[in-house]
Image: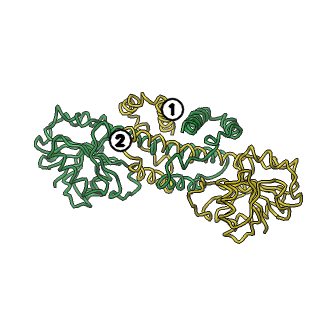
Chain colours: A green, B yellow
Amino acid sequence: MKIVIIGSGNVATHLSIALQNAGMQLLQVFSRSKASASALALQLNIPFTTEWNDIRQDAELYFYAVSDDALNDLIMRPLAPEALHVHTAGSININIFEPHKKRFGVLYPLQTLSKSKTVDFRKVPLFTEGSDDETRMIIQSLAFKLSDCCYELNSSQRMQMHMAAVFCCNFVNHLYAIAGDIVKDAGIPFDILKPLIAETADKVQTLTPKASQTGPAVRNDLITMEKHLLSLQSHPDYAALYRLISEMIKSKAENH
Amino acid sequence: MKIVIIGSGNVATHLSIALQNAGMQLLQVFSRSKASASALALQLNIPFTTEWNDIRQDAELYFYAVSDDALNDLIMRPLAPEALHVHTAGSININIFEPHKKRFGVLYPLQTLSKSKTVDFRKVPLFTEGSDDETRMIIQSLAFKLSDCCYELNSSQRMQMHMAAVFCCNFVNHLYAIAGDIVKDAGIPFDILKPLIAETADKVQTLTPKASQTGPAVRNDLITMEKHLLSLQSHPDYAALYRLISEMIKSKAENH
C-alpha cells in the first residue's frame, strides 16, 4: 500500500517508522516545518515537501498526524479524491472528514510518543474507525499489520479513551515533574524517585488501582497531610493540588 | 542482630521479610491486630504477641512500622531501654523519640508496599538517620544489608522525600483509578490503559518529565481540552482536577 504521511511530529514519526517496518511503501512526507519534515524524510529515506500542491496524488492512503488545528485546515484542501484519508487524533470525530472526503477513517495510537524515545509499536493499542464497511476493514487490516492490540471504537468512545489517557499519562507525567521539583528543593536528585515511579506503574499491571492505593490520604492520616501542606506553603498550586487529590482519595476510600 | 517487629502492615511485612532474607534473627512480631500479627508471624515462622507487656526485652533492635498515630502512643511505653529503637515513617521527625528513648533512629523505605505484591527490596531506596554517630553507623550498615540504594537524610529532607512520593506514587495511582473510571463509563476495560501507564513511567527513567510531557495541555490545544471538560460534566471533581493540572502544565511549558 502506497502511503503519504502528512505531519512530522511525534505521532507521524513513530507511525511512519512502524508502517515502513511493516513493509508499507511510504511515498513522501508533507509538513509545513522544513526542519522537521526533512529530518523525518531522512530517517525514512524518502522525499519530503513543504508545499501542499507538491504532495503526490498517487498514494492510496493519506495519514494526517498533525495538530487538531492543522487538521481542520488541511482536510479542506483538495487532495486525491479517490484515496483513503485517515487521521490519528484521539478526540476528533470521524465526521470531520464528511464534507471534504469520500473515503475516510481514523487510526488512533494510545501511547505517549516522543521522537527521542523508541517504543515497541506492536504493543501500542490502536483504535480504528472507518466511513463505510470496506474502509473499516482496510484500516483494521492495516492496524493489525502494525500492532497486536487493535480495536474498533466509535468516535465518542475514542474521545473517552483519549481523556483517560490524559489522566493516566499526561497528568501523571506532570506529577512526576512536581515530585522532581520537591526533591530538588531538598537537594535530592530526581533519580531517587525512579524505582518508586516504576513500581507504582508496575503494581497496577496486576492489582487494581484501588488495591494498589497507599499513602496518607487513603489512611486518612491527617497529621501527615497537615505537615505536607505546611511544607508546601511556598508552592500554593502544589498545595491546592495536594488538597484536591487527597480529598478525592479519602472520599473514594470511604464510599467503597 | 536480634530484632522485634512492631507492626504487621504493608511496611512491617516487606521489611521483616527483607531482614530475614538478609540473615537477621527476628524474635517476634507485635501488633494490636491478632489476625494481621498472626499472618505475618506465620509467614516469618516466628512467634507473635498482641500484648505490649509480652514483647521480648532481649532484642537489640525494635522496628516500629506502624501508623503515625500508633507510633506516638507506642514509643511512650517502656521497652528495652538499652536497645535501639527505629521507626520507618517518612514524615515523622527523629526527635519524636527523644523524651522516651536513649538510642534511636529512622530507616525509611521509599517504595509503595502492599502485602499482595512482592518487590525486590535490594532496589528499594532506604533513608537512614540516627541519634548519635554510633547509632547512625549501625542503622546504615543494616540498611546496606537490605538494599543497594541507601542514603543518610535528615528529618526535614526525608519529609520532602515522602511528600514527593505522595505526588509521584499515591496521587499517580489515584489518576490511574480516575482513568479506569472514565474508560469503564465507555464500556472499555482498564487493561487497555496498561501499556500507556507502563510507558509513561518508563519514559522518565531516561528522559526528564519535561522532555516526556505530551498531550493537549502542553500543546495548548484549547479545543480538545474544552471537549474533555464538556464530557466530564457528570464528574465535577474530575473536571476540577482536569482544569487545575492542565493550567499547571500550560504555565510550566510557558515559563520554561
Residue B103 sits above or below residue B1 on the image = above
Give me the C-alpha separation between circle 2 and circle 1: 27 Å
Q: Is residue B247 left or right of residue A154?
A: right
- Of residue A158 and residue A46, the one placed in the foreground of this image is A158
The spot of residue B224 in percent (x, y) is 36, 33
Question: What amino acid type should be assigned to the residue bearing mark 1?
Answer: Leu
Pointer 2 residue? B187
Q: Residue shown at 82%/64% (left/top)?
A: B59
In the displayed structure, would residue B39 be above or below residue A166? below
Could you tell whether A159 is left or right of B2 in the image?
Answer: left
Q: Is residue A226 above or below residue B138?
A: above
Residue occupying the point 54% across, 39% down: A256
Q: Residue B142 in the image: x percent, y percent?
A: 74, 65
Sequence-wise, which precedes: disc 2 or disc 1?
A: 2
Identify the element where label 1 is drawn: helix
Regarding mark 2 in the picture, which secondary structure is present there?
A: loop
Q: Answer yes or no: is residue A39 visible.
A: no
Going 79% across and 45% down the picture, which residue do you hit?
A: B72
Q: Nearer the viewer, mark 2 or mark 1?
A: 2
Q: Nearer the viewer, residue A155 or B14?
A: B14
Q: Position of residue A210 (x, y in %)?
A: 52, 45
The x, y position of residue B207, in whole percent, is 48, 53
Task: Judge if badges 2 and 1 mark residues of a common chain.
Answer: yes
Q: Is residue B1 visible?
A: yes
Which quarter of the picture shows residue A167?
Answer: top left
Tell me which corner region of the image, top left, top right, bottom left or bottom right, holds residue B5: bottom right
Instruction: Tell me the amino acid under the disc marked 2.
Output: Gly
Badge 1 local density, few (<14 within 10 Å), some, or many (20+)?
some
**Label 1 sits on residue:** B244
**In this rendering, position of residue B149 left or right of residue A6:** right
Chain name for mark 2 = B
